[in-house]
Structure formats: structure tokens, C-alpha cells
């Protein structure tokens, strides 16, 4: 018999998950059915499927002390009992990861669905950053806490390919973290280091002690609440209708609160990343509140950091947000799976347009039209450069590549109405007789009409184009990532919007431009061959 239990704890955090706004599906007759919240977890998260609690009790009889059976025969846990929360986490860690965990009294109890969501998201980032090509992947956990849960999970989940540096400021948590590493015999893979207790930095002082080391990523689960706020670790009740948390509150003051809250803490990581740059390949952090998530994105834009990806971790009744950024020009983070919109139903319907969205793609050539990927790459790059779009190669070459990835940058709109412009060029005829001047005047009028239509139909684009003058300090009119690869019997082009006032519509228009030019040239080539065949006959 399966249980109706939630595995997402603790509950002192914000509980207004946007993914729950679409948790109902329509049944025949217009009725609604409640969808399991576990469906919104990462696809690889093992806790999407609820564990068989009765089987868990058979394996760990100590759970009987905190479990009860209701009149219907269902086994339940009292989640307001801190002992029950801690015991459940320990049993799941032992069963699913062969990890032994001990915690001092009063420390934050790590819950596994959320932690595992974060680890899986890092794996998705690694697939784009090509960590699989590295023998060892180095990571830093900022504020590992008494459990040292993230480094432990990262090492076990990666089959000991990930080596972690865990940093912590609180002395009692530091001692407990080291004990948990030794308890699981993972000292070779996890280095627990003390942060300067009186220092004002988060990463700088620690990395200065390791001047020759570079890390693939850093991760952070910062204290969510502002220690200077009167409410401190209590979530704001803006509407007055917030229900009391159903789960036990765990965690010490320094684990839950910091001066200025999570926004100020993450803001300092952003500032330090501007100094450290590529000492860390990808900077990542979890965010506890939706309003903080929006402020962090604003801080990144203000700092001029645009190579960013985001995600949303939904588990049970708790939602968290995550942001990653990088200074590595060869890594295009928007291609990482699991962004807020690409994650499926993670935003309310009216707010989905704010995310980057999924890459748009289409087949551009068949293998019968192009013999290999290289001429496809050359053709597409030439078409883009012909309309003054800057192309910067990120991965692959023109000569030999199974995949090509580049970053596009446009200072203004040069791709709209290209089909009309080509048609006007084809109909233009040099004057050879008395009617030539009349035809030339007609073509001139057509070109004027085309310019007028551009102004009338797209006034906002023309205004934006005038305002979007090239400036190194400002974002281009459009930045996008373009990927070219071979799949089955066709060559595909995918475009991912990154930034710029042109928006995702600009990326859609460029893809349509490439489709139109490809179709036009293919038709012209076919007509040319047909004409040659007729002449030969």
C-alpha cells in the first residue's frame, strides 16, 4: 500500500509555488483531477515515485517509533515532530545512497527531493559544459552546513567523479561536516575547509588559499531570511490567508538568517564572481523566494552578466528557484535544459513570456541536398553575415565538426522583409529603351513602398533599431545562440534567445529568414537545372 506523505521539508520557507497553479487536469464531463505534485520534480529524481513506506519500515524498524496507522490502514508520519523528519531523511539516505548521517541538535535537517533536484540540474549544466570530457569535476559548496549533504550526494551520485570543496563558517557545523565525511570514508573526495569567521568575503579568501586551482562550478543554498527583519525566519503573510506550516521547522539561526537576507548574500557572490571570473566555470545558487529571484536577475543584468540560465525546483508543497551564470565564452548557458519555461508547467500561464523558453528548431537541409555538415555551416554563416549579424564560433569548426555552436549578435533589425527585398532586386532592370525609365521609376516606387510598409507595420522595431546603436556597454538589439547538427536524414538549426530588446520574436524571425533563403536558393537551383535540361534536349 502506498502512502500519502510529502518528502519536502522543512517548512519555514515560502510556500507559494507557481507550478501548483496548473496542478489540475480536466476529466470527462468537465471535472478536475488533482495532479501529484511529485510530477513537477526533475525527470531523473528518484522521489518522483513515492517510496513504499511500509517496505521502508520493514528495512528500518526504528521508523515505527514515529509512525502511526490510521483507520484506513495507511501509515503516516507526524511531520511536526522533528525526530520523525530527521529519522526519515537518515533512512532514505541509508537505503538509496548508502550514506550515514548524524546531526547535532538544532541543525537544519536536509530533505532529499530538493537536494537531488539541485544535483540533477548541475548535471544538466555539465552536459552543456562538457564535463563528461573531464576525468575529475571540481566543485565548491558554499556553506555546507552540519550535514555536508550536497558534497556527499554529489560524490555518490557522480560515482566519485565529482570532487568537492565544502566551506563553512560556523565552527560546530564545520566539525559535524568533517565527521560526516569521515563517517562515509569520502575524505579523498571531499575537502571541508573553514571560512574566515571574521572575514567579509564568501569565495575570495578561500580561493586565495588555492591560487592554482580552477573549479567547474560552485553551488550555494544561502540563508533565506534577513536577520535584521522583525519577522526573521517567518515567511511574510502578505494576504493574511497563509496557513500554518504543516512540517516541523528545523535549522539554527545562522543557517536560516543572514544580514540583508538571501538577496544581499547572493549579491556579494555576484560581486566576487566579477573579480574571480573563470576561476569558477559556472556560478550557481538556490533562491528561496520568488521576489528574491527577480531581484537577483536584476542584479545580474545590472552587472552586465548575460550568460545566464535559470530553473525552478518543485517538490511537494515547496518551490525553490535557481540561477546560474558564467564568464566562459565557450559555454552558452541558455542551452541548459530545465530553464523556468522549458521546465514545463513551472510558471503561471500569464508569466511564461518572461522566461527564455525552449530553443526553436527546424530542419534546414536534407542529406540529399548537402553532402555533409560543413557546407551547411558555411552556407548559414554566410547568410547571417550577409545581413550584418556578427557570428562568434563557440564549438566546432568549418572544416571538421559533428556539431556547430555559435553566438549571434545583431545591433539592429536587418532580417525583416528580406523576401520582398530579394523580389525587388530580381525585378530591377537597367533601362535599355524608352520604357526603361518608366520601369526604373516603378521599381523605385516599389522600394519606397517597402520602406514605408516597414515603418507602418513595425514601428516599434524601427524605433528600437534607431535607439539600439552599437555600444560596448549596452546589450545588442539581439543576442542568440545558434546550433547546427545532423539528426537522422536532415541537418537541423536551433536558435535560443539570450537577451536584447528584439526578444524571442527576433530569434523566430531570423530562423524564418534562414528557412526562406534556403527555400529560395533551392528553388532557383532546381529551376536552373530544369532550364539546362530543356536546352540540352
Image (spheres, rainbow, N blue to C red):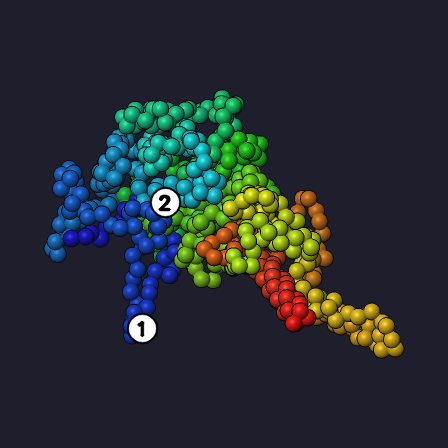
Q: Are marks 1 and 2 in contact (CB under 8 Å)?
A: no
Residue picked out by circle 2: 117
Question: Which residue is located at x 50 percent, y 48 percent?
Answer: 335
299 above or below 489? Answer: above
In terms of image quadrants, where is residue 22? Answer: bottom left
Q: Which mark is residue 87?
A: none
SS under mark 1: loop
Where is residue 38? Give x, y as percent: 31, 52
Nearest to the observer: residue 219 or residue 524: 524
In terms of image quadrants, where is residue 467? Answer: bottom right
SS under mark 2: helix
Numbered-mark total: 2
Where is residue 141? Give x, y as percent: 42, 33
Question: Which residue is located at x 54 percent, y 44 percent?
Answer: 401
Q: Which mark is residue 30?
A: 1
* 172 sits left or right of 382 in the view: left
In terms of image quadrants, where is residue 19? Answer: bottom left
Nearest to the observer: residue 309 or residue 86: 309
Nearest to the observer: residue 366 or residue 46: 366
46 above or below 274? Answer: below
Question: Which residue is located at x 36 percent, y 49 percent?
Answer: 42
Q: Is residue 224 visible?
A: no
Where is residue 394? Give x, y as percent: 57, 43
Residue at mark 1 to residue at mark 2: CA–CA distance: 34 Å
The local crowd at label 2, few if under 14, some if 14 to 19, many if 20 or more residues have their Cα within 10 Å, is many
Question: Which residue is located at x 29 percent, y 57 percent?
Answer: 36
User: For the view shown, which residue lies furthest in the right direction?
Assistant: 434
Amino acid at each position: 500500500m502506498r502512502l500519502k506523505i510529502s518528502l519536502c521539508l522543512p517548512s519555514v520557507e515560502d510556500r507559494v509555488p507557481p507550478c501548483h497553479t496548473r496542478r489540475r487536469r480536466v476529466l470527462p464531463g468537465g471535472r478536475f483531477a488533482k495532479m501529484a505534485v511529485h510530477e513537477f520534480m526533475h525527470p531523473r529524481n528518484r522521489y518522483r515515485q513515492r517510496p513504499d513506506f511500509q517496505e521502508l519500515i520493514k528495512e528500518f524498524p526504528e521508523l515505527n517509533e514515529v509512525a502511526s496507522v490510521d483507520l484506513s490502514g495507511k501509515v503516516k508520519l507526524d511531520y511536526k515532530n522533528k525526530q520523525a523528519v530527521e529519522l526519515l531523511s537518515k533512512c532514505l539516505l541509508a537505503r538509496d545512497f548508502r550514506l550515514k548521517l548524524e546531526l547535532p541538535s538544532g541543525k537544519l535537517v536536509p530533505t532529499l527531493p530538493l537536494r537531488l533536484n539541485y544535483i540533477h540540474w548541475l548535471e544538466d549544466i555539465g552536459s552543456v559544459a562538457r564535463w563528461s570530457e573531464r576525468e575529475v569535476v571540481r566543485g565548491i559548496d558554499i556553506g555546507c552546513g552540519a550535514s555536508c549533504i550536497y558534497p556527499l550526494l554529489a560524490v555518490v551520485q557522480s560515482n566519485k567523479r565529482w570532487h568537492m570543496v565544502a566551506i563553512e563558517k560556523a565552527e560546530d557545523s564545520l566539525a559535524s561536516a568533517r565527521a560526516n565525511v569521515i563517517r562515509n570514508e569520502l575524505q579523498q573526495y571531499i575537502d571541508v575547509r573553514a571560512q574566515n569567521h571574521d572575514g567579509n568575503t564568501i569565495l575570495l579568501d578561500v580561493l586565495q588559499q588555492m591560487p592554482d586551482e580552477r573549479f567547474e562550478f560552485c553551488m550555494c543554498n544561502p540563508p533565506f531570511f534577513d536577520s535584521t527583519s522583525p519577522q526573521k525566519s517567518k515567511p511574510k503573510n502578505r494576504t493574511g490567508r497563509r496557513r500554518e506550516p504543516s512540517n516541523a521547522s528545523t535549522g539554527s539561526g545562522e543557517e536560516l538568517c543572514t544580514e540583508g537576507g538571501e538577496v544581499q548574500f547572493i549579491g556579494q557572490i555576484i560581486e566576487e564572481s566579477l573579480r574571480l571570473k573563470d576561476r569558477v566555470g559556472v556560478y550557481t545558487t538556490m533562491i528561496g523566494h520568488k521576489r528574491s529571484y527577480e531581484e537577483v536577475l536584476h542584479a545580474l543584468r545590472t552587472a552586465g552578466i548575460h550568460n545566464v540560465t535559470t530553473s525552478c525546483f518543485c517538490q511537494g508543497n515547496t518551490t525553490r528557484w535557481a540561477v546560474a551564470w558564467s564568464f566562459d565564452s565557450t559555454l552558452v548557458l541558455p542551452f541548459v535544459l530545465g530553464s523556468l519555461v522549458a521546465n514545463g508547467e513551472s510558471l503561471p500561464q500569464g508569466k511564461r513570456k518572461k522566461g527564455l523558453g525552449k530553443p526553436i528548431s527546424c530542419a534546414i537541409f536534407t542529406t540529399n541536398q548537402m553532402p555533409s555538415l560543413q557546407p551547411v555551416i558555411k552556407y548559414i554563416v554566410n547568410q547571417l553575415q550577409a545581413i550584418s549579424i556578427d557570428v562568434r564560433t563557440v564549438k566546432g569548426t568549418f572544416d571538421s565538426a559533428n556539431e556547430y555552436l555559435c553566438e549571434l549578435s545583431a545591433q539592429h533589425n536587418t532580417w525583416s522583409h528580406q523576401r520582398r527585398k530579394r523580389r525587388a532586386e530580381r525585378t530591377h532592370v537597367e533601362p535599355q529603351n524608352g520604357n526603361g525609365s518608366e520601369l526604373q521609376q516603378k521599381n523605385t516606387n516599389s522600394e519606397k513602398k517597402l520602406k514605408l510598409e516597414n515603418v507602418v507595420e513595425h514601428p516599434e522595431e524601427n524605433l528600437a533599431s534607431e535607439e539600439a546603436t552599437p555600444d560596448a556597454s549596452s546589450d545588442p538589439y539581439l543576442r542568440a545562440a545558434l546550433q547546427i547538427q545532423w539528426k537522422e536524414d536532415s541537418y537541423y538549426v536551433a536558435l535560443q534567445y539570450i537577451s536584447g530588446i528584439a526578444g524571442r520574436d527576433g530569434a523566430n524571425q531570423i530562423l524564418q529568414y534562414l528557412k526562406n533563403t534556403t527555400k529560395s536558393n533551392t528553388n532557383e537551383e532546381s529551376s536552373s537545372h530544369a532550364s539546362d535540361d530543356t536546352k540540352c534536349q
